[in-house]
Image (spheres, grey):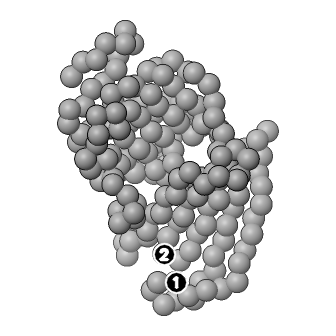
Amino acid sequence: MLAIALLISSPSCTSNSGQRSKNSSDTLLLKYSEYSRKKLDGFSYRTLIKTETADSVIFEYYDSSGTELYDRLVLLKTPDNKFGLDVHDYFFIHVKDYLVFDSLLLLKYELKNPIIDGDGGKLISPTYGDFGGFSYTWGNSGFLKQWGNTEFPDTLHKVLMADSISWPHYYFYGDGRNRK
């Protein structure tokens, strides 16, 4: 199994709100399913360091060896116990929240001003981080397949393509033709 890792607790620290809280970090090797249109092309692997504080969850993604940082997501906890992407660091806009697999919360984001080859949606979980992404133009997608010993089905294609706010948005069909 791809298995898990390391639980590290750090000493107490002061959060942005001034409250004392404990930080905790997990290091995991993740497996993603990679698709070209609806055809499974293979799998990719990332090393994740997830850090939780009283007011945020930080997901830092490294290559599979854990040496090169290539993405960082920060989810901020809101006063009403919800989560939002730290939009000061990103060019994403919130589209909609979804409950999938009975109880898993996914936040859908899209780029505010997508470039011609850079459009698409991103699904983010407050628990699991980057859960999936999709290019509306090219039809490429990737989904979190395995988080430690937890496996997920690759059934979220329709969620990524639903409720798009990007324009123009093109959806790929099984025959490979672009249609509005």
Q: In which quadrant of the rendered image does the C terminus lie?
A: top left
Q: Residues within 10 Å of mark 2 (few under 14, many from 20)?
A: some
User: Would you say 78 lies left or right of 163 here?
Assistant: right
Dot 1 surroundings within 10 Å: few (below 14), some, or many (20 or more)? some
Q: Who is closer to the viewer here, 68 or 106? A: 68
Q: In the image, is residue 39 above or below residue 44?
A: above
Q: Give the residue number, with chain letter if any, for mark 2.
A: 55
Q: Position of residue 83 (x, y in %)?
A: 41, 63
Q: Is label 2 in a helix, a strand or a loop?
A: loop
Whether residue 44 sits left or right of residue 126 in the image: it is right
**Residue 129 position (above or below residue 174):** below
Q: Which mark is residue 15?
A: 1
Q: Residue at x 71, y 78 (%)?
A: 10
Evaluate if marks 2 and 1 touch, with contact meaning CB atoms under 8 Å apart.
Answer: yes
> Type of residue at label 2?
Asp
The amino acid beneath tag 1 is Ser
Q: Is residue 92 left or right of residue 131?
A: left
Q: Nearer the viewer, residue 117 or 7?
A: 117
Q: Nearer the viewer, residue 14 or 21?
A: 14
